[in-house]
Image (cartoon, rainbow, N blue to C red):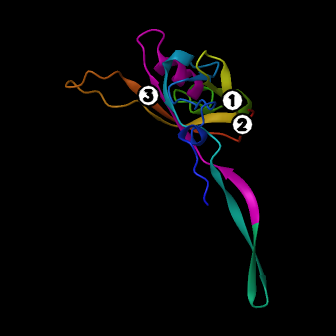
Amino acid sequence: MAEILEVTQLLANTAEPLRKFRWILALNCIDAYTARTSKRPGDGSFEETVIDFVNEKRYLSGKWTPNDFSIQLWDPIAPSAAQKVQDWVRLNYENLTGRMGYADFYKKDFDLKLLDPPGGVAQQWSIKGAWIKTIDYGTLDYSSSDVVTIDLTIRYDKAELLF
């Protein structure tokens, strides 16, 4: 005879899920409280290496390429998130002179921390060699009461899930 499970046996009473609204962006050049949304890093793809031999093909994993990820900031009047983003961009490219910066200056390391209910770090991503690939300062609209936002596309070298 088949075993019938009780409802309490099917529920994970001890599991607390991570919540989308409990996280902190720990990036020293951007104020953490201005972060509105963020995608988690770490997704990407492997290049494919094909080995042809007689009538067959064999496939091997090649180099890992991480995907870009996005961060959206809201832009307070003071201190201005737009100004802090521009300061970071100017480390890469100065539009007044046309000079480019050294990677050592514009590439940043930072952490994305997901929090548990009391505020402890439950999951931490360490992002290495990050830089701003694209910026969208958003659209202004007289008919909207929304806050002004800044959308960033971040390119990075590595992302490690620490725990």
Which amino acid type is shown beneath numbered disc 1?
Gln
Front disc: 1 or 3? 1
Quadrant of the rendered structure where residue 31 is? top right
How far apart in space, not on screen, are marks 1 and 2 (Cα)? 6 Å
Q: Position of residue 95 (x, y in %)?
A: 52, 30
How far apart in space, not on screen, are marks 3 and 2 (Cα)? 26 Å
Q: Position of residue 9 (x, y in %)?
A: 60, 40
Front disc: 3 or 2? 2
Secondary structure under the numbered disc 1 in the rendered image: strand
Residue farthest toward the right in the current orientation of the protein: 53
- Which of the pair 40/20 is nearer the observer? 20
Query: What is the span of residues highlighted in magenta in the rendered image?
Result: 61-89
Q: Which of marks 3 and 2 is nearer the N terminus?
A: 3
Residue with the mark numbered 1: 124
In the rendered structure, find residue 161 and report the number of the disc placed on it. 2
Please identify the quadrant where the C terminus is shown: top right
The residue positioned 66% from the left and 31% from the top of the image is 101
Residue with the mark numbered 3: 150
Q: Decide: marks 1, 2 in contact (CB < 8 A)?
A: yes
- Which of the pair 72/136 is nearer the observer? 72
The residue positioned 57% from the left and 51% from the top of the image is 4
- 104 relative to 75 in the view: left or right: right
User: Can you say whether 73 is above or below 66 in the image?
Assistant: above
User: Can you say whether 39 is above or below 117 in the image?
Assistant: below
Q: Where is residue 144 in the image (x, y as percent from the top left)?
A: 24, 25
Q: Where is residue 61 in the image (x, y as percent from the top left)?
A: 75, 63
Which amino acid type is shown beneath numbered disc 2?
Leu
